[in-house]
Amino acid sequence: MMLNLFHLTVLSFISSLKEETLPVAEFVNKSVKWITEKFSWFFDPIKNDFGDKLEDFADMLAEIPPSIVIVLVVLIAFFITGKKFGLATFSLVGLLFIYNQQLWEELMLTFTLVLVASLISVIVGIPVGILMSKSNLAENIIKPILDFMQTMPAFVYLIPAVAFFGIGMVPGVFASFIFATPPVVRFTNLGIRQVSKELVEASDAFGTTGSQKLFKVELPMAKTTIMAGVNQTVMLSLSMVVIASMIGAPGLGREVLSALQRANAGTGFVAGLGIVILAIIIDRITQNLNKESA
Amino acid sequence: MPVIKVNNLSKIFGKKTKEAQKLLDEGLKKEEILEKTGCTVGVNRASFEVEEGEVFVIMGLSGSGKSTLVRLLNRLIEPTEGDVEIDNENLAKMNKDDLRKVRREKMSMVFQKFALFPFKTVLENTEFGLEVQGINKEERSKKAKEALELVGLGSFIEQYPSQLSGGMQQRVGLARALANDPEVLLMDEAFSALDPLIRKDMQDELLDLQEKMQKTIIFITHDLDEALRIGDRIALMKDGSIVQIGSPEEILINPANDYVEKFVEDVDRSKVLTAENIMKRPETVDIDKHGPRVALERIREQGLSSIYVVDRSRNLKGYVTADDVSDAKKQEKKDLKEILRTDMPTVEKDTSIQEIFDIIHDASVPVAVVEDGKLRGIIVRGAVIAALANGNEVNGDDA
Ligand SMILES: Nc1ncnc2c1ncn2[C@@H]1O[C@H](COP(=O)(O)OP(=O)(O)OP(=O)(O)O)[C@@H](O)[C@H]1O
Ligand SMILES: [Mg+2]
């Protein structure tokens, strides 16, 4: 009897929950609107000036004769892998293929986006990671934020990005920054916390200041781990740059998107292949950057 | 003058340290305190002084608080209570900047697992303390090279730690600590990670270095043999407290309590006791003053079969046997020189009993203990055997 009554109450409570939806979505909408309006003094210059700069940079890259770029990349690939021919050959063939497919300009745009987005991620991410490693409080606050940033579907960032920065390259960089920064933060934190207790003690015992300890012991010790984080960040920002084509970010991603809209499997495949080639070259080069320093 | 004075120094790990210290002072045991308060006693009211140039060994079983104590000395661990004075400055109450200065200039530490920086070369590792002080490249490289020469690694400066053996790595650790020219060296189980043979080499080397440098060394070990070999004084720890401080002999011969005695029991005494501990006062005759007649008299008096011969300043000249002496007397010879024999076994004061045992086996006369050519004592076979069998019955007579 009692149990039955209890059961009923719970049921009616649960069904009543549906009657009125918590206005979370509304709240977010309002917030985004509010932020967009109040901070337009901040967003607008970024939208315009920074956007122009990005395009200038991409144009500049595109103006360098492709032959020079290809030779340069091949040389870097050759030396960074310890004078092996594998990656160098792959880069040569891959880049020539992209050139042949009339996608060179798109490649330069995509590269610009990845470069700028991951640079910003790394420049912001490493100091945040250091802060996190030095303070348990900071770690406890930042960790859930990182989880949120990483698990929220990437498309969701596109919406406020457009609100803040309009369409084009800048919102692409913004969305990519949010999506791709967590790994470098996490790995920096992890790398520093992993430095053995004896080494930290040795540093302290010789009378290092906080910053001496950081720069002379902790960062060099954590370097390999941090570089692994950088590599992941670069890869994520590349994948985000493709998604960002949906909000008008130019480059290889846009080719894929327009192929999709026209159901053209062939051009979609070719542009997709271009992204794969770029990804492999960037990935191997950043990985070897790591090995070399280890 | 003491370089380090430790007074009433305590470290309790955990939250309720006040309560734990109170219970501890009421005489509760370490385990009881852990149960009641959740606090671990690291060090309990330790007090001692370390003299300049002394090798002060802190010894105890695992978990007895040795590492905690040594880290309290340079405040890698914050004390719960008590004072640490170095050159009459209280380290425990010092501000961060002063503390850093002390760590840079007065104390260096050598670690059990070496704690070398793997991304730095041997030279760069050794320079670390100087680099931290902001000393210019040229000077610090000069000082670091000197320190590396001192530990015999002068030709390995461009190697990385991973390219060196354990013993060599710890030499780098030692050089890094010495490069600063500190007053005090803190060594936490510095040789424990090395295999026994290399460990002994390192102990010898440390003693050699110490002869040259005369640093104040605080050396942690859980190994009594090591403590006895290198310590001028030894402090024994149990459950965070110091239970006895004394010279190696004092610790061995008069253990303060059962705990110390147990600790001491399984040491091979023959490694520790030396000629000095078991020699006795020698009967002698003076080669310049005495002839066969006096010699014979003394031999008869003491019931000996031979007697050692010295000169006026106790320089050992040789020995004469009872038979030779009585013959010489019959032939009315005046001088002992004619019958002097010089094939006696001799040892130094610090020769170990084990070595003496091997020598005395084949000897027909007692072993002579000499120091700079002067006779200091003699050792008879019985004393060696007694000492090997049971250290308590050593003959402590002085020469
Ligand atoms: N950071 C810490 N937090 C809590 N308890 C600690 C901490 N460090 C040491 N202890 C405890 O303090 C006691 C003394 O430890 P300590 O490391 O000083 O012993 P030790 O004599 O150096 O032992 P070992 O020979 O194993 O190195 C132990 O009971 C240990 O568990
Ligand atoms: Mg220890």
Image (cartoon, coloured by chain):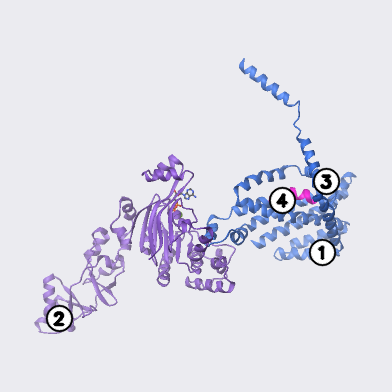
Element type at mark 3: helix
* Chain on which label 2 sits: B
| Label 4 sits on residue | A181
Magenta stretch encompasses residue B184? no
Is residue B190 visible from the viewing direction of this image? no
Q: Residues within 10 Å of mark 1 (few under 14, many from 20)?
A: some
Choose top left, top right, bottom left or bottom right for residue B313.
Answer: bottom left
In percent of the image, x 70 and y 49: which residue is there? A182
- Count residues near mark 2 (Cα–Cα under 10 Å), then give few for <14, some for 14-19, many for 20+: some
Q: Residue at x 73, y 53 (%)?
A: A121
> How far from the left and from the top, in percent, is residue B324?
15, 79
Query: Image point 83% across, 66% down: which residue?
Result: A68
Q: Earlier in the sequence, mark 1 or mark 3?
A: 1
Q: Pick whichever of labels 3 and 4 is earlier in the sequence.
A: 3
Q: Amino acid at mark 4?
A: Thr
Point out residue B280 in the picture as x, y percentages from the top left corner: 22, 68
- Discs 3 and 4 lie in a common subunit: yes
Q: Is residue B215 above or below residue A271?
A: below
Secondary structure of the residue carrying numbered label 4:
helix
Q: Which residues are magenta?
A: A172-183
- State the blue chain: A
Q: Nearer the viewer, residue B22 or B214?
A: B22
Question: Mark 1 and mark 2: span between their CA atoms?
Answer: 105 Å
Report the residue marked by disc 2: B290
| Relative depth, front residue between B321 and B280 | B280
Q: Nearer the viewer, mark 3 or mark 4?
A: 3
Determine whether, in the image, residue A280 is placed left or right of residue B153: right
Which residue is identified by label 1? A69
CA distance for labels 1 and 3: 33 Å
Quarter of the view holding residue A20: top right
Label annotation for residue A162: 3
